[in-house]
Image (spheres, rainbow, N blue to C red):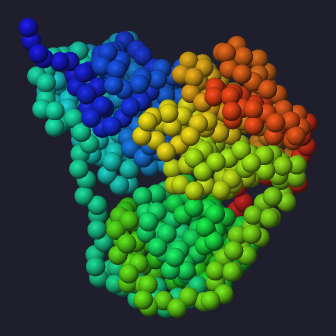
Amino acid sequence: MSDRITVGEVAARLIEGCAVRAAFGVVSIHNMPILDALTERTVVRYVAARGEAGAANMADAYARVGGGLGVVVTSTGTGAGNAAGAVIEARNAGTPLLHLTGQIDSDFLDRNAGFIHETPDQLGMLRSISKAALRVRTAPTALGTMREALRIALTPPQGPVSVEIPIDLQKALVEPPDPGAFHLPALTPQIADEAAVDDAARLLSTARRPVLWVGAGARHCAPAVDRFARMGWAIVTSIAGRGILPEDDPMSLASFGASRAVEDFFDTCDALLVAGSRLRGNETLRYGLRLPRPRVLIDIDETARERAFPFDRFICADAAPTLAALAPRLEAKMQIDPRFAADVQAARTAAERSLREGLGPFADILAAVEREFRPQTLWVRDITISNSTWGNRLPALTHPRQGVHALGGGIGQGLPMAIGAACAACEPRTRWEPPVFALVGDGGLALSLGELGTLAQERVPVVLIVMNDGGYGVIRNIQDHEYGKRRFGDITAPDFGTVARAFGIESRRVQSVAAFGDALHWARSSGSPVLLDVDMTAIGSFRQTWAGPPARTSG
């Protein structure tokens, strides 16, 4: 009897060897050998999503929370296309994601003969949405192709990589590879040139009021960032970099960089060091934010040079070893203004006060969330007014993987991301405690409503906070502000509580601040998935209308 195994099982063993313990997907005739091997071996939890977009969002969030690899398995053609938006989100977020997609039989590839699930130039589509896209050409090369995909996905700047495996090759038998081949490839950090580090240190060493801005590319830099904070630097983060320095640290400006109080504070500063951040337009007043000079940028991506703002020095290298090399060169030389720490705290306090004052009654909703929030609580958010006004900045995060949000700005991703985050949080190796708090809007939830079925089936502990304003609230605000109050494109949503209960998920409708606090406390202790449908109209209005990210024309 042969000991040979299918290519589908090769894929399953590789996923296991990469310390992935949950994979996400939608079963199809063109991916069954992979999913059959995964479920038969029982090492990896297979989560059956209701759609490929949701599955990819789940895998993305799983990777962000766990700090490792995410895996999503889709079908070919329409199935692979359905995942496109979520793969684009993973690319925006720099998530190392392995997207295994089926493909039709090798004999019929690229013939455009109308084979079921066929898509002309699917590989070209995958290349356009992924960091890279590869095709398995023969059964013996399958493992090498998938390992190359892992190397590309994990090499900074990280991102999703798609791999097509024709169905006949998934079923093909091969000799079992050496067990040592089933693991993540070793990667060598890109170390900065010593002369470049010395030059940057000379430029920064005379600063008395320096600022370090860190983003998602510096999530692995927490010890070095803490060292800069202890040196007396002010630390500001992008939204994706929240928690790299705990946001309750006295030197933290959190993600308030674009607030008026912090921008005024920047005017008093005399140096800026940026590590692993794109300084995204919606976080820098559309690239018009006044930032200190001189400026030094550390980024692993050579194309980051002068991409959004002018910089006096650019170091193309991994942020962690570069910050670690800069710190000792600066510690003995810098003479920080003795008033600087107090000014940091004053700017942070003023920025936070202004945010809360603009929320009206929703400041009390935020306060209720903060009362139930813990240092081990995961905070997942969709694109909705409540997230854009307060969820992206509060409650305070204390770990760089505590927050997950739709970085690319697409709605409807919060629920599936919460499921993926909760799957990661349920693993024994995790530091997180259930439940996951997920902040979504009614418009976004309508887009991914089917994934309530996945939430019910998996029974992962998620408190889904639905901020329900009866449609696309931010779109209405923009239309009022820019289109003469002409309304178009709004939607009608269902009774979310009824839908949730139809899936066996507990739900409460909330129509007052006091009721919200009580309901959130109950939901937190339930141990099961819960949906809270918050009637924003009954609660009141924001004091300041939010109609899209603030902008200022640069120059």
- Identify which residue is drawn at 17% across, 24% down: 139
Instruction: Give residue 367's position: percent from left, percent from top.
Output: 79, 50
Residue 454 location, quadrant:
top right
Q: Is residue 509 above or below residue 552?
A: above
Q: Is residue 360 left or right of residue 110?
A: right
- Identify which residue is drawn at 8% across, 8% down: 1
Instruction: Give residue 195's position: percent from left, percent from top.
Output: 29, 82
Q: Quadrant of the C terminus?
A: bottom right
Foreground pick, 357 / 226: 226
Instruction: Give residue 431's position: percent from left, percent from top.
Output: 49, 45
Residue 40 location, quadrant:
top left
Q: Is residue 118 above or below residue 263?
A: above
| Residue closest to the far left | 1
Q: Is residue 251 left or right of residue 364?
A: left
Q: Is residue 106 left or right of residue 437?
A: left
The answer to whether one can see residue 493 in this image is yes
Instruction: Give residue 500's position: percent from left, percent from top.
Output: 70, 20
- Identify which residue is drawn at 79% across, 33% down: 519
Q: Is residue 222 above or below residue 121?
A: below
| Residue closest to the far top | 1
Residue 436 location, quadrant:
top right
The answer to whether one can see residue 284 in this image is no
Foreground pick, 487 / 361: 361
- Identify which residue is drawn at 55% across, 80% down: 232
Q: How many numbered badges does the structure rendering display?
A: 0
